[in-house]
Image (cartoon, rainbow, N blue to C red):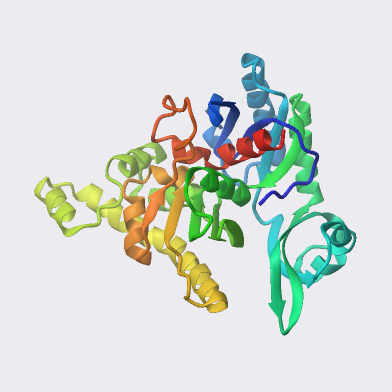
Amino acid sequence: MEISFLNRKKCVGLDIGSKNIKVVYLTTRQKKLYLNNWHLVNLPNEIVSLETPPENREAIVIDILKNIFSKNKNLPKKSVSSISGPSVVIRPIKVPLLTKEELSKSISIEAEPYIPFAIKEVYLSFDIIGEILEEGVRKNEVIVVAAKKDVVDKHINILTQCGIVPKYIDVDIFAIERTLKYNYEIENENVCVVNIGANMTNVAIIENGVAKTCRDLPLGMFYILNEMKKLKQMEIEEIINYFKNDGLILTDEEKEEYLSQNKKVELSISKDLVAILKEFSTELHKLIDFYYFQKGEQKPISKIFLSGGGCVIKNLALYFTSEFKIETEIVDPFKKILNADDVPNELRPFFAVAVGLAIKGYQNG
């Protein structure tokens, strides 16, 4: 799916997250995508919180972007970037059987009942994904995206202050969808995506290659770390080290091994982490239950894909497999991309959005 608010042009993928900024520039060799350049720059810890004044965060983001592009002259100044969160709404709707040109003239009227914002306050985009028969009437099934104008305009303003020309503003979950479609065989499958960011988790069920059921949860790694900090009275960096080295201790064999080594702190952190993750899994259970309520269980979800900074937690995929009884895999956005060997394995899940944006930038050049 390609949802856009601006014009088409070949460009870099630029993911401005709450915790870090990711840049991916793709070209081609041997008719395959080739990683020409990539960057991941962490933002200062003091501006990661949602409580940080926007002007403080924007100034630092602008400085970092200017620095990246000034030091890497081969990076195109045209970008595909993305937004997500409560200011973005994704809705599957059914509309009369019209051409795309006809629907573009009436989409505001068709979409308005499904959008929780004043229609004049949003940019609208849509994609026709197929035809359906409803009560004997043929209709178009359409994915509608509404993004608040003030959020999009502010995002564009940050880019233009850096000398970057924004050609597309995409949505995080559609970028991940694109990454999965390039690297994995999902066109004939129903899969679930869980992208755990710093302040937010994007979840979606992708049906036959199209993200139809989407939700943004106001829970992320920042929440997990702060809850653990309250429980354990530890510094954030110390907690992260436990997450990376020990993470979730799930099997009886592992637990016995840790007990034999008197690693009680690690076991305690794992137990508390499972309790915190229950909040995530509860919301995901609701989404999956809603999906099955709507679609039935004729074609079940075959796999869960995890991405984002939350993947630093050791054994997170095993936890999801056990919790949902669905095979779970951590996304490798560079799986089928040439010249990506120097991207460390532990950083790859961070790039699920940026790679999808870069693919869009290349394909639409």
Residue found farthest to the front? 30
Query: 239 left or right of 102?
Result: left
Give coordinates of residue 123: x percent, y percent. Answer: 81, 52
Query: 125 left or right of 252?
Result: right
**Residue, x 75% and y 33% (percent of image)?**
9
**Residue, x 83% and y 68% (percent of image)?**
110
**Residue toward you, 96 or 4:** 96
Give coordinates of residue 30: x percent, y percent. Answer: 53, 26
Q: Residue 25 occupies which quadrant of the picture?
A: top right
**Residue toward you, 189 or 309:** 189
In this rendering, does residue 57 appear at all? Answer: no
**Residue, x 25% and y 57% (percent of image)?**
250
Give coordinates of residue 247: x percent, y percent. Answer: 31, 47
Q: Residue 275 occupies which quadrant of the picture?
A: bottom left
Q: Above or below — where is 252 with respect to 233?
A: below
In this rendering, does residue 104 appear at all? Answer: yes
Query: 19 left or right of 168?
Result: left
Give coordinates of residue 254: x percent, y percent. Answer: 17, 52
**Residue toward you, 27 or 235:** 27
Image quadrant holding the C terminus, namely: top right
Query: 262 left or right of 197?
Result: left
Residue found farthest to the left? 260
Residue found farthest to the bottom? 135
